[in-house]
Image (tube, coloured by chain):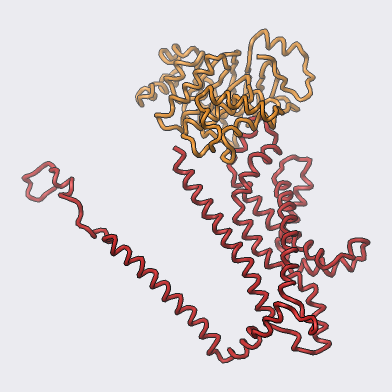
Chain colours: A orange, B red
Amino acid sequence: MSQPELRANRDGPASTVEAAMSSNEAIRIMGVHKSFGALEVLRGIDLSVAAHEVICLIGASGSGKSTLLRCVNLLEPVDRGQILLWGQDVTAPGVDENAVRRHIGIVFQSFNLFPHMTVLRNITLGPTRVLGTPREQADELGRALLARFGLAEKQDDYPDRLSGGQQQRVAIVRALAMQPGIMLLDEVTSALDPELVAEVLGVIRELASAGMTMLIATHEMGFARDIADRVCFLDEGVILEQGPPKQVFTAPVNARTQQFLRRIVDAGRL
Amino acid sequence: MRGSGESVYVDDQTLVASGPPPPGSFGGGSRRSHLLGMQSAAAVSTASTVVFIGAVVALFVFAPGAAAVRHTFFNPQQMKEAFLGDPRQGLYSVGKGLILNIEMFLIAEVLILFFALVIAVLRQLRNPVLFPFRMLAVIYTDIFRGVPLIIVIYGIGFGVPALYLKGISTQSDFVYGIAALVLSYSAYVAEVYRAGINSVHQSQVAAARSLGLSQWKSLRHVVLPQAVRTVIPPLLNDFISLQKDTALVSTLGAVIEANRAAQIDSSTLFVYSSYTVAALLFLCLTIPLARFTDHLIARDVSRRMAGGTAVR
């Protein structure tokens, strides 16, 4: 993965980029706070994600998983703290947020496909309008991606003709078409019927094995255990516990993590 | 529980009805009686229509002033003259006037669609540099939605020529009329656009912005196409009323005509039947537009229902 240029006018010292390359660090989150009015959603998050690492964020609804993801791609501005992508501070003033976002793919719980565009146009919108890729080239890339994820025959359909699982796979392909260095997945299977979850998880597994750096907020504990290099348990806006999935799921240290996992097990979700 | 106490369990007989309900127990019936039902419904609606029209006709036939009204508003000879025009008597053709109205309507419509969109978009952009424009857009819509069209028409039609501005004050009533219609209607239509823009869910904007699209590009490629689709029926509704409001522009010329009529004092020139002709001609234009709007709304509804079942 080449070093993407995040600033509109690059003035940072080249040494920062080199340092990031040597440390192989894709994301560094430092002391991030975020409130919505009186509600404090993130209360000091510190997290470092290496390139090619897959991190699963688990925790109850409202623990701040989604907000953290939205902060990383600047959909929500942070109140305090810093977020570094490939060593560059993207929370600093004067950063071109559009330039940052084109290197980060995000997939939402509710798909958010553009209903007035065909599947292929959904996918080529970013490349043609943001990257300036010629239409034919973008179409070619879009078709190749669709074929790779078993959606080739859907390219001319409108999103409302697709099943939820197909829509979510298209949403993943739409993000991938920008050739991002990082993928953020925000509870991408939560809105799906149970029998449609597997096809979406399959796509994510494929991405992980291809070496994509991913930050995944999920309620699918079995999936998190399989796919994650590291699992982070969020509770009331802080990371209470993190470690390899084996450790977090079988021998959690923190009492709240134990409580959370016990509830999940009781619900038959693990 | 059954009273006797002999049975503590609920047997199958109480859970499953002994057989299908007898025919007709849901109030329907055989196919034949269904057809009869449709026929009688048609008969009832026909009868009520006939009675209603009969009552309206009776009003025009038996009312005390019916003969006078028929003479002034429905004089066939005068209606024919009004439609064709009679240059010898100084009568203008209502039909010709209508063509002028249509020209005015079409030009105004294109300009309104454009200006209203600009105003709606200006109100939407959150860039601090554009703040003065946003404020101007708010003031503009507030003023021109509040002022009656007829006053705007008088203001432009009589006010602008009085300014004696070179090139601007020497235009025809046709131009002033269009200017007044555009000023007044753009304010309404901008609000319709704005409602459409606000109806597009915020998650669509998030999806667009997360791809790296700028605020303007997400508006242009994601929000506006969806917003415009939503507001086509209400827009057409506004254009039906624009179509008939073009008639108000004729007040600019009509004032002069009325003065002249008063000077000659020949009341025969002032033919009320021409108004009836004009009203009928306007209906010929607005009713098809109204039906077309209905058609679009119905199509939109059925498409949404189809979309609702397809998403699963």
* Viewer-side residue, A108 vs B61: B61
Q: In this view, does B192 lie above or below A88?
A: below
* Viewer-side residue, B16 vs A170: A170
* Viewer-side residue, B117 vs B59: B59
Locate residue B105, reporting x and y percent: 72, 62
Locate residue B120, reporting x and y percent: 70, 49
Q: In this view, does B215 lie above or below A43?
A: below
* Viewer-side residue, A42 vs A218: A218
From the viewer's perspective, tell me whether residue B119 is left or right of residue A148: right
Give residue B12's quadrant in the image. top left
Locate residue B61, reporting x and y percent: 54, 88
Give residue B76's quadrant in the image. bottom right
Q: Residue at left 61%, top 62%?
A: B289
Quarter of the image that includes the C terminus of chain A: top left
Does the rendering let one see residue B287?
A: yes
Q: In this view, does B272 lie above or below B132?
A: below
Locate residue A15, reporting x and y percent: 75, 11
Residue projecting furthest to the top:
A22
Quarter of the image that includes the N terminus of chain A: top right
Q: Residue at left 68%, top 63%?
A: B242
Give residue B15's quadrant in the image. top left
From the viewer's perspective, tell me whether residue B278 is left or right of residue A66: right
Q: Is residue B299 above or below residue B58?
A: above
Does the rendering let one see residue A78?
A: no
